Image (cartoon, rainbow, N blue to C red):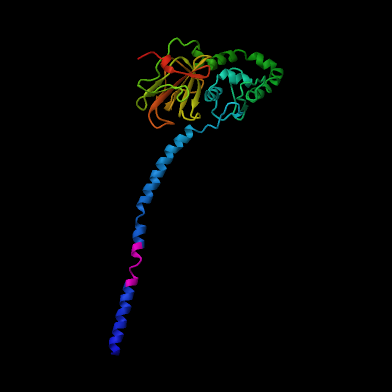
Amino acid sequence: MTRYLLGLMGLGIVLFAACADHPPAPIEDRNAVAAPVKQNRTATTSSSIVADKKVAATSSPPLRPGVPYRVEKGDTLYSIAFRLGIDFRRLAAVNGIESPYVINPGAILTTDLSKTRKTSVAAKPAPQPAARPSPPKPVKSAPPVAKTPAPLPSSTPARTVSPVTAVKLGPVSTWRWPTNGGVQRTFSNNLHKGIDIGGARGAPVRATAPGVVVYAGTGLSGYGALLIIKHNERFLSAYGHNDAMLVKEGDGVREGQQIARMGSTGTDSVKLHFEIRQDGKPVNPLKLLPAR
């Protein structure tokens, strides 16, 4: 009997040890499903890149009429007036800024058009440094200056020859379609300040009329990579959502010259958003463009 009891006890110990070796199996199975985590990280990275593009295209600080605005890097007087929907000349006048309307980052602009200012904070930083060193130089170096009149005239014309001077601004006799493709969305004064024109990614975007590029950047919310061209003192045109901008601020452009490649920056489909502004106000481009 004693041997029988000892045998049963030994068998129980063996069975208990065997069972103790197997419980971790379910935990290892759960940990083995780790591959999907890597896939999720990849997906997150991909969507964050798209988000970065959207952030870059909508990175402009708030701008409300009547509220003072601090000039940011990349701003121009034209782009600020464009965002406000006002004539750039009026914005310049209330801030005491004269042509060529240079503004500096950090300057505070008033957007209250009822005010007037004779001197501008925005214009002071640029002229002051240049004006201070200039008086002492002619006094001390009068003889040397007299010896170097010849090189100065020869170098000055070379620097002033630029695309801007090659384009004469004036009344626009004809407006040209900025790209081929059908109109996807028409003009609405309150909801849609221009027209959307469809097309293939990389399709040429051309200047609707001769002018000067007064803004090239991604600082205006909802426009993606945007170009603004000044045609004269009353008319501007704008080209949004470009994949690539082929001209820069200050460049003169001819009618029909390619200025960009169509894309989808700041939006969810490939298209060109095209606007024409008259005295700062959006007008229906279809009333100015030739019928087709």
Q: Residue at x 30, y 89 (%)?
A: 2
**Residue range corresponding to the magenta coloring:** 19-26
Instruction: Pick the residue in front: 112 or 273.
Output: 112
Q: Quadrant of the C terminus?
A: top left
Instruction: Pick the residue in front: 143 or 222.
Output: 222
State how many labels appear.
0
Residue 273 in the figure: left or right of residue 74: left
Q: Is residue 157 above or below residue 192?
A: above
Residue 268 sits in quarter: top left
Whole-percent x, y for residue 115 in the image: 65, 21
Residue 137 in the figure: left or right of residue 71: right
Whole-percent x, y for residue 262 in the image: 39, 26
Q: Is residue 162 visible?
A: no
Q: Is residue 177 visible?
A: yes
Residue 282: say if magenta: no
Whole-percent x, y for residue 250 in the image: 51, 20
Q: Quadrant of the N terminus?
A: bottom left
Instruction: Pick the residue in front: 102 or 60.
Output: 60
Whole-percent x, y for residue 55 in the image: 48, 35
Q: Is residue 16 above or below residue 101?
A: below
Q: Is residue 13 above or below residue 24?
A: below
Residue 54 sits in quarter: top left
Q: Is residue 160 above or below residue 273?
A: above
